[in-house]
């Protein structure tokens, strides 16, 4: 097996005096889709912030294609080829839909994603392209956030709580669009509270509990009881 | 009657100079929420750089802008990345203290380098040239200054809303973390914003130096005029800054018309009235 595209080696993450992650080990191979599940406060968002460079760590605790990226700034990580769809969309309020998308292409990596490709994936965005991004519905904003991340043509894309606060019908349509995104060989990590949704598109899963990996394995090999135990920390 | 019309028209033209003072302040505050107490002294620094350039190269002050603008932009970039970026954070006090200190240092350095003697940039016959329009005598220099102010503000507006750089300015202003995720190094973007602001300041300084005499101590007064124009116009609205400058200028010339001693006071009173009636300024930025 070739080298993992993304590798976490004993990742510790801190917010000031508070330690949020304890020695997390993970490996993500090229083309894989990994689900990260866990209760509120388990460290999922911290994990996303650490990988994307918003939170700085010891350099070699996060490795991307063998290179240490743990200590890099978020913009340097973006240039390396990692994109994050942040929790809560976080669009740029003073930019239009299309300006948000264009900003995503700042790093200028080559690849299949362009404004046209994003509009093909989410046609409603083309209709709304000149509107202020925050005038869109929550689901449409999530499409902009996903499109904005794709515009950098990342090798690894991280989704943080993509269904949070969205109506079930919207969540369904976004998950229907996911194969069109990650089917092209892109590597993805999906953080999700909706375990069923996350497992439906993933090949492997890691469960976090209080900052530690409490369970990992192939989706088909893991039972519901194991997940429940790993999620809540009760003995199975 | 014509005297009052004249006072208003002269005030509008004076407002162009104040808008030039204010444009850089407005831009810096808009992009990085930095209140730059040293802005007035940077205007005076630009005037002195204009003086040195005209003396050393023997060129017209307007030609000196070709040197002073890039020089101020370079100073801005280095200042931002070397010093001011380190002060930015959730606490608004450090940038205030550091730029206040910078203001003191600039004043004293200028005093050391150029002495306290008043200086002036000599622009030749254009300083006294005037046009006669409907019984009013309009100075060519104030007209030129006002035209420059409109051009500068239109230019800034274009940069902000029609270029990739402006998109980056607005994105970083909206959300620094997410902008960083998009591959923008905010330290660099802030450096570019300060460079642009001080390039505008270079124009303000040279136009000030051509219009009136200056010495190292007058930066503070220019800072106040700039602030007042920004606040009257409404934070974050760059055309509002021009309107703010005009209102301040008109208040001053009308005050001076009533009594010459009231010029500056009338401007401050107009500012206080706007602040009391419309604390967000007359044309605050519309949030989407």
Image (tube, rainbow, N blue to C red):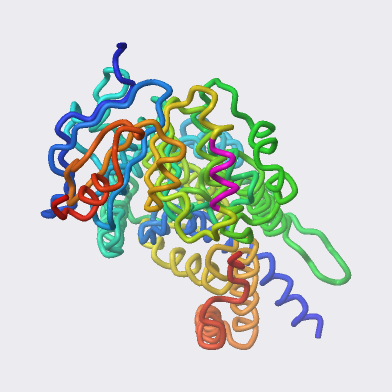
The part of the chain drawn in magenta is A171-178
x, y percent for residue B76: 41, 43
Q: Is residue A174 magenta?
A: yes
Task: Tell me which corner region of the image, top left, top right, bottom left or bottom right, holds residue B65.
Answer: top right
User: In this image, A189 relative to B252: left or right?
Assistant: left
User: In this image, B151 relative to B175: left or right?
Assistant: right
x, y percent for residue A77: 36, 31
* Residue B191 is at least partly visible in this image: no
Name the residue: 60% across, 83% down. Answer: B255
Q: Is residue B212 magenta?
A: no
User: In this image, B286 relative to B57: left or right?
Assistant: right
Q: Residue lying furthest left in this view?
A: A17
Q: Residue lying furthest top in this view?
A: A1
Name the residue: 32% across, 26% down. Answer: A28
Name the residue: 42% across, 32% down. Answer: A188
Q: Depth check: give the residue in front, A116 or B155.
A: A116
Task: Tell me which corner region of the image, top left, top right, bottom left or bottom right, holds residue B146.
Answer: bottom right
Vertical comparison of A150 with B143: above or below: above
Q: Count the numbered circles shown.
A: 0
Q: For the N terminus of chain A, which image quadrant?
A: top left
Q: Depth check: give the residue in front, A224 or A196.
A: A224
x, y percent for residue B283: 62, 72
Name the residue: 31% across, 11% down. Answer: A2
Vertical comparison of B104 with B2: above or below: above
Q: Specify the principal SS of the magenta part.
A: helix
Q: Depth check: give the residue in front, A11 or A71.
A: A11
* Residue A116 is at least partly visible in this image: yes
x, y percent for residue A49: 31, 44
Q: Depth check: give the residue in front, A181 or B14.
A: A181
């Amino acid at each position: 097996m070739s080298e993992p595209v993304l590798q976490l080696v004993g990742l510790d993450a801190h917010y000031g005096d508070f330690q949020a992650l304890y020695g997390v080990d993970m490996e993500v191979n090229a083309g894989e889709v990994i689900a990260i599940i866990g209760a509120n406060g388990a460290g999922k968002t911290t994990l996303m912030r650490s990988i994307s460079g918003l939170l700085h760590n010891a350099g070699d605790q996060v490795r991307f294609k063998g290179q240490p990226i743990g200590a890099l700034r978020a913009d340097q990580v973006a240039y390396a080829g990692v994109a994050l769809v942040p929790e809560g969309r976080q669009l740029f309020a003073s930019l239009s839909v299309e300006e948000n998308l264009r900003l995503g292409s700042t790093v200028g990596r080559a690849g299949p994603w362009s404004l046209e490709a994003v509009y093909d994936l989410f046609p409603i965005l083309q209709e709304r392209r000149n509107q202020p991004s925050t005038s869109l519905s929550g689901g449409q904003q999530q499409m902009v956030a996903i499109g904005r991340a794709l515009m950098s043509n990342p090798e690894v894309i991280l989704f943080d709580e993509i269904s949070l606060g969205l109506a079930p019908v919207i969540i369904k349509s976004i998950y229907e669009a996911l194969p069109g995104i990650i089917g092209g060989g892109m590597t993805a990590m999906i953080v999700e509270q909706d375990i069923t949704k996350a497992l439906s598109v993933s090949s492997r899963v890691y469960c976090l509990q209080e900052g530690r990996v409490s369970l990992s394995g192939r989706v088909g090999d893991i039972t519901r009881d194991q997940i429940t135990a790993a999620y809540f920390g009760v003995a199975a | 009657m014509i005297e009052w019309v004249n006072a208003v028209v002269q005030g509008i033209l004076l407002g162009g100079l104040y808008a030039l003072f204010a444009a850089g302040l407005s831009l810096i505050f808009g992009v990085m929420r930095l209140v730059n107490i040293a802005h007035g002294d940077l205007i005076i620094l630009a005037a002195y750089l204009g003086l040195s350039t005209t003396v050393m190269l023997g060129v017209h002050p307007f030609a000196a802008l070709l040197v002073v603008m890039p020089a101020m932009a370079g100073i801005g970039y280095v200042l931002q990345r070397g010093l001011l970026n380190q002060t930015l954070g959730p606490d608004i006090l450090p940038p205030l203290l550091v730029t206040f200190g910078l203001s003191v240092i600039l004043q004293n350095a200028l005093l050391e380098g150029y002495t306290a003697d008043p200086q002036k940039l000599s622009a030749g016959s254009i300083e006294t040239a005037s046009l006669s329009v409907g019984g009013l005598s309009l100075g060519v220099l104030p007209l030129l200054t006002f035209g420059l102010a409109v051009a500068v503000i239109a230019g800034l507006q274009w940069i902000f809303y029609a270029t990739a750089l402006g998109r980056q300015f607005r994105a970083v202003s909206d959300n620094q973390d997410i902008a960083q995720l998009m591959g923008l190094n905010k330290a660099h973007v802030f450096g570019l914003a300060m460079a642009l602001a001080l390039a505008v300041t270079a124009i303000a300084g040279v136009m000030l130096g051509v219009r009136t005499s200056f010495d190292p101590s007058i930066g503070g007064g220019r800072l106040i005029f700039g602030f007042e124009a920004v606040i009257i116009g409404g934070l974050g609205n760059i055309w509002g800054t021009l309107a703010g400058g005009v209102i301040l200028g008109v208040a001053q010339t009308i005050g001076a018309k009533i009594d010459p001693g009231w010029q500056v006071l009338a401007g401050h009173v107009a500012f206080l009235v706007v602040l009391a009636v419309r604390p967000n300024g007359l044309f605050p930025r519309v949030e989407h």
